[in-house]
Image (spheres, grey):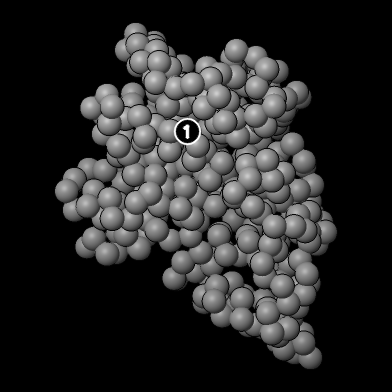
Amino acid sequence: MDIEERLSLITSSPAEEIVTKEELSSLLEEKRTVKAYDGFEPSGIPHIGTGLMRAEYGKDLEKAGIDFIVLIADWHAFLNNKLGGDMERIQKAGEFFVKVWNLLGWHPRVVWASDLVEDMEYWETLLKISKKLTISRIKRAAPIMGRKETEMQHAAFLIYPLMQATDIKMLDVDICQLGMDQRRVNVMYREIAPSFGWKKPVLIHHHLLMGLKVDGRMDYSSEDVMMEFKMSKSVPDSAIFVTDDPESIRRKVRGAYCPEKKTENNPIIDIVKHIILRREGHTLTIERPKKYGGEVTYYSYRDLEKDYKEGRLHPLDLKNAVAEYLIDKLEPVRKYTEKHPEILDIVKQVTR
């Protein structure tokens, strides 16, 4: 696979911001093995953004020759009081995250934060980074925890961004490939890395799926607004979980905000663009009676978007097709949890 083909896979949706494309191209030309990572707090049941979209994009990155590491951030989840701060439940939830990705066909290399922190170098690195940063700069990184800056009341919340920056150094990655909500720490690390003689990673931030009930603009210039509008486990009906049964998926999709002829800030269109028709070779078939246009198969997001804007594709027909697509894709996870229902009780979030 040549450089252009690799770049096409890496920069396809849901990739939304690359810092910088020139550095990414040079990296692929210069290094035979390129390492990237994404980190996850085990904080409950994954929704289709952290589960399905992550797995689909992860598989493409591996096709492009990226050695991809998933960091299961169990210590970070403990600091952030996820799952009540119960480390045993947190680690069970982390194991479930990995199981979900495997069931969806993605088998990344997994590293646990609890293993990283056993190395004394980890804490030495964290202290070095802490001396480069002001408290106000660290507090501005609050969105990486799913919190607002005004919520940074505990000392643990100041340690969290320092740990995430330290993770980058300890994993020795060439690419930080996380969600748009994680960009503040990644940018912060890029800025301070040269002062230590450390390599400056390329940043690839992926799109955050919109919540199903969103009827406003996903504004990345304001992290508070971004957190409010993204798909979130804390608002169950705004999210489709990888464990949802078919009727729950149909109900949630039917009830989603999906205005006729409008594709901007439309949660159902968002799923189509960033999961279903995210790149060439993907298809979506719309089944409908002949009097409403008959069956039609879309081979590109651009064609579907055009028909939707011009009113040739009705919201209800699109919703029905999206629901059935998700039901089919999530079947392996659903079958697993039907056989192991106890896992849902263990990983279910009870307190923030």
Q: Position of residue 302 (x, y in %)?
A: 54, 76
Q: If the image is split into quadrants, where does the N terminus sit?
A: bottom left
Q: Position of residue 197 (x, y in %)?
A: 23, 27
Front residue of 352/194: it is 194
Q: Is residue 242 above or below residue 1?
A: above
Q: Position of residue 79 (x, y in %)?
A: 59, 17
The residue sitting at 60% across, 12% down in the picture is 155
Front residue of 168/37: it is 168
Q: Which residue is mark 1?
A: 185
The local secondary structure at tag 1 comes to helix
Circle 1 crowding by C-alpha within 10 Å: few under 14, some 14–19, many from 20: many
Q: Position of residue 226 (x, y in %)?
A: 65, 46
Residue ranking furthest to the top: 120
Q: If the image is split into quadrants, where does the C terminus sit?
A: top right
Specify the amino acid type for callout 1: Val
Answer yes or no: is residue 220 visible. yes
The residue sitting at 39% across, 44% down in the picture is 203
